[in-house]
Image (cartoon, rainbow, N blue to C red):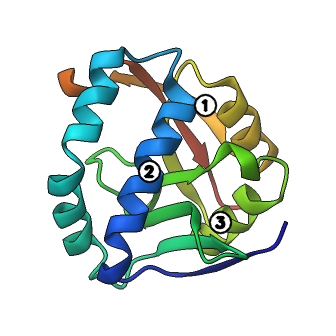
């Protein structure tokens, strides 16, 4: 399956938010309530406007498009958001549609967003597929854990870090 990766623009906000909503439903149906997903779908118009603003940046805001020009994945990275950040670069998110699993898209997005740089990320604790993916690319749990905000039903997340290679 072919794909192309490029920097997202504010014009991509609608397709990106709709893809992101679908991928949350694909990835987290077991962890989050039906009410959560109803609220996410209901907030699509507001999230499109928020996303449009966040796409007007030079930080990596990458989208992946399939052969039919449909958004099938994205990655966001940038300066660390945590005061106690273990690295200066944070991988905010990588998501791909389930139909793209095994295509190499996740690895391509990771490389496009952070290359081989030291970086860290927060990962849903109960996400074995993503955990295996990040371990494969040199990220390790560092023992930090926190709860997501109430609108995310306070799910626990763990921090993973990839330090500079000696």
Residue 137 visible in the displayed image: yes
Badge nearest the viewer, 3 or 2: 2
> Label 2 to label 1, Cα distance in Å?
25 Å
- Could you tell whether 68 is left or right of 42 in the image? right
Q: Quadrant of the N terminus?
A: bottom right
User: How far from the left and from the top, in percent, is residue 44?
Assistant: 24, 50
Describe the element under mark 3 as helix, strand or loop.
helix
Q: Quadrant of the C terminus?
A: bottom right
Badge 2 is on which residue? 20
| Residue 130: mark | none
Are there few (<14), some (14-19), or many (20+) residues within 10 Å of tag 3? many
| Residue 109: mark | 3
The tag earlier along the polypeptide, 2 or 1, is 2
Badge 1 is on which residue? 141
Badge nearest the viewer, 1 or 3: 3
In this picture, is 5 found above or below 149? below
User: How far from the left and from the top, in percent, is residue 47?
Assistant: 22, 54
User: At 59% across and 68% down in the image, what residue appears?
Assistant: 114
The tag earlier along the polypeptide, 3 or 2, is 2
User: At 48% across and 32% down in the image, what residue appears?
Assistant: 25
Please tell me which residue lies in front, 1 or 108: 1
The image quarter in which residue 88 lies: bottom left
Determine whether label 2 and label 1 are within 8 Å by CB. no
- Could you tell whether 47 is left or right of 13 in the image? left
């Amino acid at each position: 399956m072919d794909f192309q990766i490029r920097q997202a623009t504010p014009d991509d906000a609608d397709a990106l938010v709709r893809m992101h909503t679908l991928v949350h439903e694909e990835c987290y149906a077991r962890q989050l309530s039906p009410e959560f997903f109803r609220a996410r779908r209901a907030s699509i118009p507001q999230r499109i406007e928020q996303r449009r603003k966040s796409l007007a940046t030079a930080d990596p805001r990458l989208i992946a498009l399939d052969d039919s020009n449909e958004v099938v994945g994205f990655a966001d990275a940038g300066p660390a958001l945590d005061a106690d950040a273990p690295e200066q670069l944070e991988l905010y998110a990588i998501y791909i549609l389930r139909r793209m699993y095994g295509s190499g898209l996740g690895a391509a997005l990771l490389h496009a967003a952070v290359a081989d740089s030291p970086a860290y990320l927060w990962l849903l604790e109960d996400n074995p597929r993503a955990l295996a993916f990040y371990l494969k690319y040199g990220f390790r749990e560092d023992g930090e854990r926190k709860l997501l905000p109430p609108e995310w039903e306070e799910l626990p997340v763990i921090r993973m870090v990839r330090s500079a290679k000696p």
